[in-house]
């Protein structure tokens, strides 16, 4: 067996022995990495599902043209004629005041007696305009909305894009928050894993000193520490992914998520396989980085 | 084999461990390094295996300037230099066999060769009946021989021994010196740091004497 192969075998054996020499410390390292990746993963999961939700909304973009109480038949037919010639509109649906009231009562059953309490039907009639895919960008939607705002009989024009964009902003915020908190906890994990590596180096300082004096190469000395830290990180990453999966399943089954369609969308899907794998690999990388920094500090690098 | 050119070593607190030392040790030579405690013997030895570097001057070992060699070359230098430390530096959790085999393992020798070399050197040093004992289970003399075995197992060109008989009774000390003579007769360059004047007289070899870091004599005793 040649030198490099022997060195690899030595690293594997020593790393394995090192991991089991003090299982509590090994577990502490893995857990600290696991916790930081779990929190990061939670934010990623939320951002991922919100993103999916935003995409779903994007596909259903509609523009609502709310009409005045005083709208006339002529106004309605003029509007219909304009809609028919607008290249951005694929279809038009007219919602009467009565339709709007019924829809409200269906969507918000707890407030179904609101129209009666108000005394009259407060909901305006409207046109719902389906927008063609090519016109769903903010500028086109804005143009469509503006071109009907001042039309006779129109009270207000609204489109979903406004709050879709706000949601996109929320997704970005969630992602940024996740990254920020992930970096903070990742730093804490670095410190913990680094301290564990340093303790191990300290416990084996005699051995390391003799290794250096009899001519061991730096790679031979560091190899076991780096490998052990990588394994701890990988285990931490796997713990994080498993924790996220369990959390996701629990949330999915919770009553509040099953009964609320919006929440169901938010908690909809688990992370894609490559993102989950990246978390585990990220754990290993975090472990190795901590070991390198710590070995450097201990003068072993 | 080993050349010191105007070597000085000043520690950060201002102490001068060596001052302008120039000396040449031939291949296959057996040299005593002597002087009172604090004369600079250990610093002198440390420079040969690059555990310390001169503040000024040059240390050349086997045609290579030790002070300026890149860090990655240091393991190669140390494989050519076996060191017997004053405090032995044995690993208490490893057996006699493991302590010696450890030196062969860290330089990446094949497993079969690790074992055969270790058995061979332990037999030569009369430790083959102690293979599975731990350092604390063997005598001071045996611990000393373990340290020598570990220094020899990688077949170094140079053997350095820092006060190798300091803790031993006279008979045992004589035995160890006999061993060094034997090793030297096979071509290994040996430097023994000691302040045991009787032993130096008995062996009649070249002596490098240091006093407060200065070379005061480099002649046959």
Image (tube, rainbow, N blue to C red):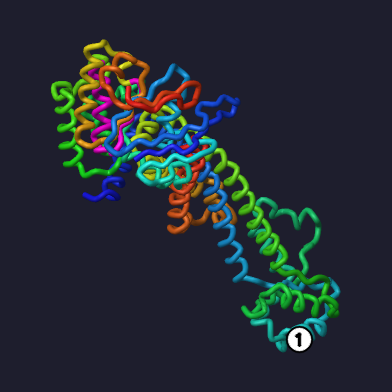
Judging depth in this view, the residue of B176 and B88 nearest the camera is: B176
Displayed quadrant of residue B111: top left
Q: In which quarter of the image is the N terminus of chain B?
A: top left
Q: Can residue A80 be seen at all in this image of the molecule?
A: yes
Displayed quadrant of residue B132: top left
Q: Is residue A221 magenta?
A: no
Q: Is residue B118 above or below residue A89?
A: above
| Residue picked out by circle 1 | A82
Output the chain of dot 1.
A
Give the x, y percent position of residue A48.
55, 57
Judging depth in this view, the residue of B103 and B217 nearest the camera is: B217
Displayed quadrant of residue B179: top left
Q: Give the range drawn in magenta.
A: B141-163
Give the x, y percent position of residue A109.
65, 54
Q: Can residue A301 be seen at all in this image of the molecule?
A: no
Give the x, y percent position of residue A140.
72, 78
Q: In which quarter of the image is the C terminus of chain B?
A: top left
What residue appears at the point 63 percent right and 52 percent down from the top-left corner? A174
What residue appears at the point 30 percent right and 45 percent down from the top-left corner? A7
Give the x, y percent position of residue B21.
47, 32
What residue appears at the point 16 percent right and 28 percent down from the top-left corner? B124
Judging depth in this view, the residue of B178 and A9 nearest the camera is: B178
């Amino acid at each position: 067996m040649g030198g490099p192969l022997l060195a690899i075998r030595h690293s594997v054996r020593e790393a394995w022995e090192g991991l089991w020499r003090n299982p509590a410390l090994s577990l502490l390292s893995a857990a600290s990495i696991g916790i930081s990746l779990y929190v990061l993963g939670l934010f990623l999961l939320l951002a991922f599902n919100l993103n999916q939700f935003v995409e779903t909304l994007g596909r259903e973009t509609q523009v609502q043209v709310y009409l005045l109480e005083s709208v006339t038949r002529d106004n309605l037919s003029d509007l219909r004629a304009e809609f028919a010639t607008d290249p951005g509109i694929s279809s038009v649906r007219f919602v009467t005041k009565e339709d709007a009231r019924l829809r409200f009562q269906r969507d918000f059953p707890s407030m179904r007696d609101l129209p009666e309490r108000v005394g009259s039907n407060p909901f305006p009639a409207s046109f719902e305009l389906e927008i063609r895919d090519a016109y769903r960008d903010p500028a086109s939607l804005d143009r469509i909305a503006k071109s009907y705002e001042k039309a006779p009989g129109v009270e207000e024009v609204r489109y979903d894009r406004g709050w879709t964009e706000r949601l996109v902003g929320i997704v970005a915020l969630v992602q940024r928050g996740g990254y920020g908190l992930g970096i903070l906890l990742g730093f804490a994990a670095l410190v913990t894993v680094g301290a564990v590596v340093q303790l191990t180096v300290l416990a084996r300082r005699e051995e390391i000193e003799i290794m250096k004096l009899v001519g061991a190469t730096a790679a031979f000395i560091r190899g076991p520490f780096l490998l052990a830290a990588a394994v701890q990180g990988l285990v931490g990453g796997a713990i994080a992914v498993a924790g996220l999966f369990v959390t996701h399943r629990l949330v999915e089954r919770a009553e509040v998520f099953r009964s609320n369609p919006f929440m169901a969308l938010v908690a909809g899907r688990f992370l894609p396989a490559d993102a989950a794998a990246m978390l585990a690999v990220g754990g290993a990388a975090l472990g190795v980085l901590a070991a390198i920094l710590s070995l450097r500090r201990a003068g072993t690098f | 084999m080993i050349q010191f050119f105007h070597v000085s070593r000043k520690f950060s607190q201002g102490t001068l461990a060596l001052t302008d030392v120039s000396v040449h040790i031939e291949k296959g030579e057996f040299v005593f390094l002597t002087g009172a405690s604090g004369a600079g013997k250990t610093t002198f030895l440390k420079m040969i295996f690059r555990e310390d570097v001169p503040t000024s001057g040059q240390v050349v070992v086997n045609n290579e300037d030790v002070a300026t060699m890149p860090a990655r070359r240091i393991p190669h230098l140390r494989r050519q230099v076996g060191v017997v430390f004053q405090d032995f530096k044995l690993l208490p959790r490893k057996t006699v066999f493991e302590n010696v085999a450890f030196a062969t393992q860290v330089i990446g020798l094949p497993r079969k060769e690790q074992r055969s070399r270790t058995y061979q050197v332990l037999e030569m040093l009369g430790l083959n009946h102690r293979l599975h004992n731990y350092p604390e289970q063997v005598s001071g003399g045996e611990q000393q021989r373990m340290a020598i075995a570990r220094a020899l197992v990688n077949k170094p060109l140079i053997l350095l021994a820092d006060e190798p008989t300091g803790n031993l009774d006279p008979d045992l000390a004589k035995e160890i010196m006999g061993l060094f003579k034997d090793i030297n007769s096979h071509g290994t360059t040996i430097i023994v740091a000691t302040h045991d004047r009787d032993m130096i007289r008995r062996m009649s070899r070249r002596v490098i004497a240091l006093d407060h870091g200065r070379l005061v004599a480099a002649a046959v005793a």
